[in-house]
């Protein structure tokens, strides 16, 4: 209950006690005048209570109107709306934090059915872990696609349909989550963005002092003491009595003076050393050109940058009508096939799965979607990992006859046996969804990778694209520079093993983070057993 309500109940209780103790008020005008003042206080408190309730109801009404407009627009195209990472983050934030605040507001003095329903529903709302995960996804997208905080905040992302700007509170929340994760780089970026929007006049319950406190500390943690001191002084200009800032000011000044003295001593020492070594100069050696780390190559390919195939190699890639050596299913209606890459050889099949089939597969998979796992290379146990952000499900012919038809289609076009292949896996990538560089096949240091299946190693991978992606979401091969972009209704295929059975390490690949949009894929991992006569073993290791 609100304080006014308690005050009213207290006064009514006092009044009733007075009436009980002095039931002969009419005999004394003096005593009755006291009751007039008591009643006046009651009326004043009652009016205060009414005004507070009206303010609360107006606040709730504004919230409801805002959410009514938002949900009406969002539910017209839920996947398209949540394809914008900011919308997904803000949904996590609303359901995990803001709806709870609303519940507390309304619960102050009501036991309405709405509150009971809300309390029950909140058990199924996103948790702190979900909100943190959505925030980390935004930070990951920011790094991978080199987006500045302001671009994300104003919602100006490539291919967006539902532009969604971020408030000061959103930016502050993102910075605070980064701070909790000891990620001071992103703490600085998002606290600076929150400060920028406050300086531009945006109204917010978050004050500049709070933002500057986080900002100065994050900058200090990155070793930039002079800048940390600058922001601390700005904080103290707004709140001269801020105790932590006053302490930090003295500490930063001390550290700067210490750095200055150390630098002077080093400069003097270097000068003397230079004089002594002048006669012993050696010619400059050319610095060795280092290779680009895999992470950098992966992110470059995700942005559409990186290695390019030479014109000569490009000229050897073709498009064709394909019937897999006059397979009876495709003689009269061959499939459109396109070469995507030469080494490893990656081909794309166009118009290979229909819209109706895609929708049925999604319908069957959605109730079964669970957080995707990876096999721990040491223990062999399936577990979740931060570098694989998606949910997946598995479908067989027992679930629907259409799955059998899809499996048969893969067999007809690859010529490989499907009876020993794994079930059809369906995956849906969430906000910033990705799968960092990995191999599909088991390496020599993982001899028991697929032992429980009893079908040998993964000889090949077939990957259906079941949605277009507005931005990001490519399948990239960092070692060779290949990037395959999602296109609904197509599928790509490659061999993971050479004909000799040795692993092709150039097939190491990754699923780039989805920047804008919603990515659905399904894949078939095909195994060695059953392929003995379909793909005969080569005699040389390189075959």
Image (spheres, grey):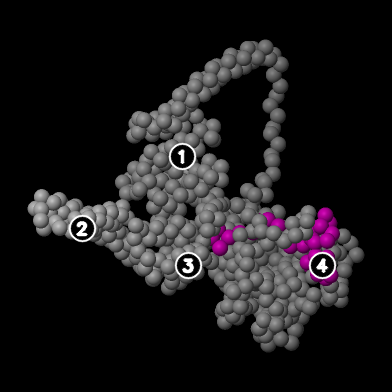
Q: Identify the residue at image location x=41%, y=30%.
A: 243
Q: Position of residue 97 (x, y in %)?
A: 45, 56
Region of the chain picked out in magenta, as a range = 430-459
Circle 4 residue: 452
Structural crowding at the residue carrying mark 4, measured as other residues with C-alpha within 10 Å and reported as few (<14), some (14–19) or many (≥20): few
Question: Does the segment drawn in magenta span residue 445?
Answer: yes
Instruction: Give above or below for 432 relative to 209.
Output: below
Tag 1's secondary structure? Answer: helix
Q: Quadrant of the N terminus?
A: bottom left
Q: Nearer the viewer, mark 4 or mark 2?
A: 2
Tag 2's secondary structure? Answer: helix
Circle 3 residue: 120
Task: Please report whichever mark, 1 or 2, sits nearer to the chain's N-terminal start.
Answer: 2
Circle 2 residue: 19
Q: Nearer the viewer, mark 3 or mark 1?
A: 3
Circle 1 residue: 214
Q: Identify the residue at image location x=58%, y=64%.
A: 429
Q: Nearer the viewer, mark 1 or mark 2?
A: 2
Instruction: Give above or below for 430 relative to 285.
Output: below
Tag 4's secondary structure? Answer: loop
For the residue pair 542 and 529, the one nearer the viewer reads as: 529
Circle 4/circle 3 CB separation < 8 Å: no
The answer for how far apart the CA atoms under marks 4 and 2 are is 84 Å
Structural crowding at the residue carrying mark 1, measured as other residues with C-alpha within 10 Å and reported as few (<14), some (14–19) or many (≥20): many
Task: Please report whichever mark, 3 or 1, sits nearer to the chain's N-terminal start.
Answer: 3
Tag 3's secondary structure? Answer: helix
Task: Please report whichever mark, 4 or 3, sits nearer to the chain's N-terminal start.
Answer: 3
Task: Please report whichever mark, 4 or 1, sits nearer to the chain's N-terminal start.
Answer: 1
Task: Please report whichever mark, 3 or 2, sits nearer to the chain's N-terminal start.
Answer: 2
């Amino acid at each position: 209950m609100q304080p006014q309500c308690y005050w009213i109940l207290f006064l009514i209780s006092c009044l009733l006690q007075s009436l009980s103790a002095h039931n002969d008020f009419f005999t004394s005008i003096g005593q009755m005048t006291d009751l007039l003042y008591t009643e006046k206080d009651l009326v004043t408190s009652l009016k205060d209570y009414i005004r507070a309730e009206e303010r609360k109801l107006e606040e709730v009404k504004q919230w409801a109107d805002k959410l009514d407009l938002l949900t009406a627009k969002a539910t017209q195209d839920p996947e398209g709306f949540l394809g914008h990472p900011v919308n997904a983050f803000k949904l996590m934030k609303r359901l995990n934090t803001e709806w709870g605040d609303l519940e507390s507001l309304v619960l102050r003095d009501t036991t309405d059915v709405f509150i009971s329903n809300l309390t029950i529903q909140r058990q199924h709302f996103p948790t702190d872990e979900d909100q943190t995960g959505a925030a980390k996804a935004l930070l990951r997208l920011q790094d991978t696609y080199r987006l500045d905080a302001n671009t994300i905040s104003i919602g100006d992302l490539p291919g967006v349909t539902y532009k969604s700007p971020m408030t000061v509170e959103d930016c502050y929340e993102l910075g605070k989550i980064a701070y909790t994760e000891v990620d001071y780089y992103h703490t600085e970026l998002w606290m600076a963005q929150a400060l920028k929007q406050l300086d531009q006049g945006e109204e917010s319950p978050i004050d500049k002092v709070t933002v500057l406190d986080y900002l100065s500390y994050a900058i200090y943690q990155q070793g930039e003491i002079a800048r940390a001191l600058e922001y601390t002084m700005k904080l103290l200009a707004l709140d001269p009595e801020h105790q932590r800032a006053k302490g930090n000011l003295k500490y930063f000044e001390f550290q700067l003076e210490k750095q200055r003295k150390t630098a002077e001593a080093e400069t003097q020492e270097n000068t003397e050393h230079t004089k002594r070594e002048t006669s012993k100069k050696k010619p400059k050696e050319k610095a060795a050109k280092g290779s680009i780390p895999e992470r950098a190559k992966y992110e470059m390919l995700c942005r559409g940058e990186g290695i390019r195939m030479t014109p000569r190699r490009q000229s050897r890639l073709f498009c064709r009508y394909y019937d897999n050596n006059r397979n009876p299913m495709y003689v009269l209606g061959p499939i459109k096939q396109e070469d995507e890459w030469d080494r490893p050889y990656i081909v794309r099949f166009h118009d290979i799965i229909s819209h109706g089939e895609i929708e049925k597969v999604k319908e069957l998979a959605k109730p079964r979607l669970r957080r995707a796992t990876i096999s721990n290379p040491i223990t062999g146990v399936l577990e979740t990992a931060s570098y694989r952000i998606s949910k997946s499900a598995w479908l067989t012919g027992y679930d629907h006859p259409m799955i059998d038809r899809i499996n048969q289609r893969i067999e007809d076009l690859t010529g490989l046996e499907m009876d020993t292949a794994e079930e059809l896996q369906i995956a849906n990538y969430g906000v910033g969804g990705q799968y960092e560089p990995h191999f599909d096949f088991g390496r020599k240091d993982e001899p028991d990778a697929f032992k429980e299946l009893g079908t040998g190693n993964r000889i090949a991978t077939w990957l259906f694209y079941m949605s277009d992606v507005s931005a990001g979401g490519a399948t990239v091969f960092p070692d060779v520079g290949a990037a395959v972009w999602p296109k609904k209704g197509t599928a790509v295929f490659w061999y993971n093993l050479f004909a000799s059975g040795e692993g092709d390490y150039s097939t190491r690949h990754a699923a780039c983070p989805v920047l804008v949009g919603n990515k659905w894929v399904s894949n078939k991992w095909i195994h060695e057993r059953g392929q003995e006569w379909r793909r005969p073993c080569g005699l040389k290791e390189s075959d």
